[in-house]
Image (cartoon, rainbow, N blue to C red):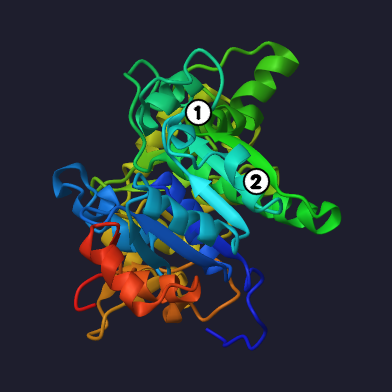
Amino acid sequence: MPTHDKPLPLEGIRVIDLSRLLPGPYLTQLLADLGAEVIKVETPRVGDYARIAPPEIGLAGLFPAVNAGKKSLAVNHRKPEGREILYRLVATADVFVEGFRPGAVKRWGLDYATLREINPRLVYLSLSGYGQSGPYRDRAGHDLNYQAIGGSLGLNGLAGGPPVPPSIPLADLGGATFSAIAMLAALLGRERTGQGMYLDMALADAVVAWMAPLAGGPYFAEGIRPERGKMPLAGGLPCFNVYETADGRYVSLAPVEPHLWGNFCRAVGHEEWRPRQWDADLIPELQALFHTRTLAEWVALADGVDFCLEPVLDYEETLQHPQIRHRGLVLEDEEGRPAGIASPFPFLPRRERPPAPALGEHSAEILRGLGYAEEAIRSLAGRGVVGLGEGK
């Protein structure tokens, strides 16, 4: 991967991040990967819940995966002295991110109206499940709930079967990505107006927005009601589907363009299938066809003919795939074993992503930068207002 000498796009932008677990930290991880200085504000004793997330629900390793290269400030913002630290920090910041339930930050004196008086240029983003307004404003929820009411969960699965939870948290990641886009737009707009902005972002909103092209589009344009397993690009077309092979593995077939579909029909010796590209009744015949060869045999055939077929890989196979490795998306440990996923952005050598911080690792450094003397820092630590991390 080439080294880039130019500064990263967000260098010089300071982000204060009070969010926890996945959506907010993923948002600020994207900003950090683009060069922003992200100061992760955590409670002194426990910190982000992701640090102690139970592996039983698949969250082991979540914290380092979405907090690489950030700084950790451990401060009790519910104490007046802790809040004063954050007020000083806000005066130096460009972005403030919080992911608490609506209304919580106002009780703590960390709402946008309060912080805007300190820093009118501040871009403030609240990321919540259902948003800061509406009948579900105060309702608890998680990714699966947002997908459920957003319509995507009901459409995920095979025709005639139950809804199937997706393998990745689409609402969390989608909401975080939309938030990053909104944040970048607000920072760009600030360059013209000189004023900050408040952004109310909801994870459930992201699910509904993502439904528009493939589910909402046909519904609004033609009145076609989306159904699980029958949508064209979700199991309803023979030319865009998943098929089981002779050895119990699976392939993805996606020759949507007529000339690519023609290549496939010719390669498998079924020219008569050309006019049936959109005929759902052809699916059983294709299922029978794919059962005649192993996964390796189908991949070998596709290597010599252009018709959009790829194997359905398990996660370990993905980490070893030559294209994925070539793009530098897999981080390795000192012994060359896969150790994480790199930033998707091309602005930096991907293997130079710094590690996630220890709890309170940068507290003293940040406080010094805000003008606190060493004696004052030790006093704050002794009274539990801040945490200084191990060995500090």
Q: Nearer the viewer, residue 289 or 379?
A: 379
Q: Which residue is mark 1?
A: 204
Q: Could you tell me the amino acid type at mark 2?
A: Arg
Q: Is residue 269 left or right of residue 123?
A: left
Element assignment for label 1: helix
The percent coordinates of residue 325 (x first, y second) are 42, 74
Q: Nearer the viewer, residue 40 or 88?
A: 88
The image quadrant that residue 220 belongs to is top right
Mark 1 or 2, nearer chain start: 2
Report the Cα–Cα distance between label 1 and label 2.
Answer: 27 Å
The percent coordinates of residue 7 (x first, y second) are 65, 81
The reply to whether residue 266 is visible in this rendering is: no
Q: Which residue is mark 2?
A: 116
Name the residue at 25% across, 59% down: 61
Q: Is residue 309 left or right of residue 161?
A: right
The percent coordinates of residue 260 (x first, y second) are 63, 50
The percent coordinates of residue 184 (x first, y second) are 67, 54
From the viewer's perspective, is residue 130 above or below residue 124?
A: above
Q: Which mark is residue 312?
A: none
Q: Nearer the viewer, residue 105 or 333?
A: 105
Q: Is residue 21 left or right of residue 199?
A: left
Q: Quadrant of the C terminus?
A: bottom left
Q: Could you tell me the amino acid type at mark 1?
A: Ala
Q: Residues within 10 Å of mark 1 (few under 14, many from 20)?
A: many
